[in-house]
Amino acid sequence: MNDTPDKIKDLLESAIKANSAAWLAHSKYFDDLVQRNMHSFATLSSARDASLKEIGESLTFNEAFEANMTYEEAVHDEVKKLKEENDNAWTELVAQLEQIYSLDSKDEDKP
């Protein structure tokens, strides 16, 4: 019974360490998410500017239509890429959190 305060102290230290690591993992995930989204939106904005310029310079309806279709394909590709990157980042975050909060099998064996 004399070691109970030490066990409580160890438990609290372990919880603080895990929560700090989880906070860092979450922070990195959300910082990276914002960066990915900003980059994607900037790419889409540039693509739209270029497509509108191309549409404005088109001499026929077909040229304008093709310019817009090219933009729509670029949007599809960029959004698909962004979704895949975000899905991968989420999977990585979940794996990190599982590792952070998993119990060490050595600790489970202690009385």
Image: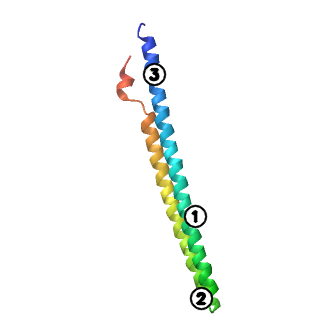
Up-down: is 80 above or below 68?
A: above
Residue visible at 50% across and 32% down in the picture: 19
What amino acid is labelled 3 in the image?
Leu
Disc 2 marks which residue?
Answer: 63
Residue carrying label 1: 41
> How far separated are the C-alphas under marks 2 and 1?
25 Å
Q: Secondary structure at mark 1?
A: helix
- Residue 85 in percent (x, y) is at 48, 58
Please tell me which residue is depicted at 53% across the width and 62% down the height of the picture. Answer: 39
Which residue has dot 3 on it? 11
Residue drawn at x 44%, y 43% as measured from the top left: 95
Instruction: Determine whether the residue tagged by mark 3 lies in a helix, strand or loop.
Output: helix
Q: Which x, y percent locates residue 21?
A: 46, 36
Q: Which residue type carries mark 1? A: Phe
Separation of residues labelled 3 and 1 (CA atoms) = 45 Å
Dot 2: what SS? Answer: helix
First reached walking from the N terminus: tag 2 or tag 1: 1
Quarter of the figure with the C terminus: top left
User: Residue type at mark 2?
Assistant: Glu
